[in-house]
Image (cartoon, rainbow, N blue to C red):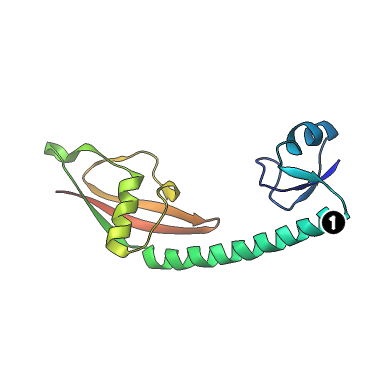
Amino acid sequence: MKIVLREDVDNLGRKGDMLEVADGYARNYLVPRGLALKASKGIVKQAESMRRSREVREVRDRATAEEVAAKISGARVEIKARAGEGGKLFGSVTSSDIADAVLAQSGVEIDRRKIDLVEPLKELGPAELTVRLHSGVDATIHVEVVAG
């Protein structure tokens, strides 16, 4: 069955894509949940407009992400944390703490979920982190955890 997606569906496609899927999958899952519409002439035209608006939005979002990357790329962010002997922190520095510090020190707001931090920082010292701002647009920030 030919369908047009109304929403992004994991492992299937993005909003506005016209796809061929199994009849049962379309009838029993996609259409009842409002994720897709059965393809017809009017729906196909609507899908084309959804794709065009998605492309315009993606270009705008990418340009914004590149501007933000230019502002914060190579930036040095200092975070004060309480530490004991040997440089071990009482607690840890999380991606949320880093996002707040970037906002306070550079005036750029970044989403904490876009900071590539495998596990929280638990020691004093430098760390180099990647911020994924958009697909293909990454920025590197230098975080310095100091005793405070």
Q: Which of the pair 35/69 is nearer the observer?
A: 35
Q: Which of the pair 2/45 is nearer the observer?
A: 45
Question: What's the residue at 68%, 40% (across, down)?
Answer: 11
- Most distant residue in the left direction: 85
Question: What's the residue at 49%, 63% (across, down)?
Answer: 65
Q: Looking at the figure, which quarter contains the N terminus?
A: top right
Label total for image: 1
Instruction: State the SS at label 1.
Output: helix
- Residue 25 location (% of width, % of height): 78, 33
Residue 116 located left or right of residue 45: left
Question: What's the residue at 70%, 46% (across, down)?
Answer: 13
- Residue 62 location (% of width, % of height): 55, 63
Quarter residue 104 falls in: bottom left
Against 82, residue 139 (above or below) is below
- Residue 55 location (% of width, % of height): 66, 62
- Residue 85 location (% of width, % of height): 11, 37
Question: What's the residue at 64%, 65% (across, down)?
Answer: 56
Residue 68 located left or right of residue 136: left
- At label 1, the amino acid type is Gly
Quarter residue 141 falls in: bottom left
Against 26, residue 116 (above or below) is below
Disc 1: CA contacts within 10 A as few (<14), some (14-19) or many (>=20): few
Residue 43 located left or right of residue 10: right
Q: Which of the pair 29/131 is nearer the observer?
A: 29
Q: Which residue is mark 1?
A: 42
